[in-house]
Amino acid sequence: MAEMGKILVIFGILMVALGLFLVFWNKIPILGKLPGDIVIRKGNFVFYFPIATSILISVILSLIFYIIGRLK
């Protein structure tokens, strides 16, 4: 039961971090505007594919999960 409690606490912390990240997403000027993000505008159509931003977020999340794994 104690192990289940630890997992729920970690999950809760991750959910709070994700929520804060989503709330402040627009206030972080570099995310979404990195070199390597693809934006195609034609008339009233806009296609946006944030490749570089996705890689950056993936690296950050990998480091966070690696640190959490080392703490266990």
Image (cartoon, rainbow, N blue to C red):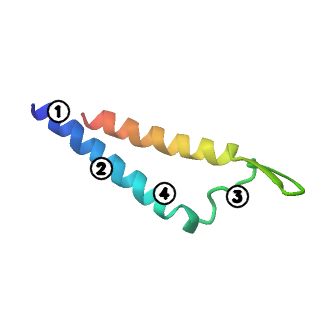
Q: Which residue is mark 1?
A: 4
The percent coordinates of residue 60 (x first, y second) are 50, 45
Q: Mark 1 touching mark 2, by CB under 8 A?
A: no
Nearest to the observer: residue 70 or residue 36? 36
Q: Residue at point 35% right, 48% down?
A: 15
Q: Which residue is mark 2?
A: 13
Spatial CA distance of label 2 from label 4 is: 14 Å
Q: Earlier in the sequence, mark 3 or mark 1?
A: 1
Q: Residue at point 70% right, 58% down?
A: 33
Q: Mark 2 touching mark 3, by CB under 8 A?
A: no
How many discs mark residues in the rendered view? 4
- Amino acid at pointer 3: Lys
Q: Which residue is mark 4?
A: 22
Spatial CA distance of label 1 from label 2 is: 14 Å
Viewer-side label of 3, 1: 1
Q: Earlier in the sequence, mark 2 or mark 4?
A: 2
The percent coordinates of residue 1 (x first, y second) are 9, 31
Q: Earlier in the sequence, mark 1 or mark 2?
A: 1
Category of crowding for the residue at label 4, using alpha-carbon neighbours closer than 10 angstroms: few (below 14), some (14–19), many (at least 20): few
Mark 1 falls on what kind of element? helix
Residue 58 sits in quarter: top right
Marker disc for residue 33: 3
User: Left or right: 1 with respect to 15?
Assistant: left
Category of crowding for the residue at label 2, using alpha-carbon neighbours closer than 10 angstroms: few (below 14), some (14–19), many (at least 20): few
Spatial CA distance of label 1 from label 4 is: 27 Å
Mark 4 falls on what kind of element? helix
Q: Earlier in the sequence, mark 1 or mark 4?
A: 1
The percent coordinates of residue 5 (x first, y second) are 15, 38
